[in-house]
Image (cartoon, rainbow, N blue to C red):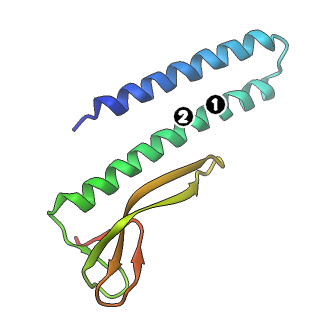
């Protein structure tokens, strides 16, 4: 299912990357290939991080809320109990920091905390 709001945000971000790169190029007409590549990569990595974050957040919500699959502990297989939302900071391969906020689960059997929850297949 399409999420039009997310796609609109990505389109806006894409437009900002293109406009920003174009403006940067106007200010740096003598930039060499390496500089152009570094600038482009930096701008694209910001967009990439946003897309990864949005996609991961959507997936986590869909899995936990779907109700089709029981959330289970990967250590002991016990049932997970929702224990509120928690934030977690991660880094992409390009070094961009993303923050995910998802439901945190606690195993009723062994007490293990899970973020994001694993699902029984």
Label 2 close to label 1 by CB (< 8 Å)? yes
Residue at 81% across, 10% down: 29
In the picture, which quadrant includes the C terminus?
bottom left
Residue that numbered label 2 is attached to? 47
Residue at 81% across, 14% down: 28
Residue that numbered label 1 is attached to? 43
**Total number of numbered discs in the rendering:** 2
Q: Residues within 10 Å of mark 1 (few under 14, many from 20)?
A: some
Q: Is residue 9 left or right of residue 43?
A: left
Which corner quadrant of the image does residue 40 belong to?
Answer: top right
19 shown above or below 36:
above
Q: Is residue 84 left or right of residue 64?
A: right
Residue 61: x, y in percent? 30, 54
Residue 71: x, y in percent? 25, 72
In the picture, which quadrant includes the N terminus?
top left
Residue at 33% across, 57% down: 60
């Amino acid at each position: 299912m399409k999420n039009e709001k997310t796609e609109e945000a990505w389109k806006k971000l894409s437009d900002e990357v293109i406009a920003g790169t174009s403006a940067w190029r106007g200010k740096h007409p003598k930039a060499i290939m390496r500089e152009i590549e570094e600038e482009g990569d930096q701008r694209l990595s910001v967009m990439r991080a946003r897309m990864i974050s949005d996609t991961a957040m959507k997936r986590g919500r869909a899995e936990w809320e779907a109700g089709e699959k029981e959330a289970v502990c990967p250590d002991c297989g016990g049932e997970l109990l929702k224990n509120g939302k928690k934030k977690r900071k991660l880094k992409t391969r390009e070094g961009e920091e993303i923050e995910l906020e998802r439901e945190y689960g606690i195993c009723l059997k062994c007490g293990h905390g899970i973020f994001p929850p694993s699902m029984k297949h």
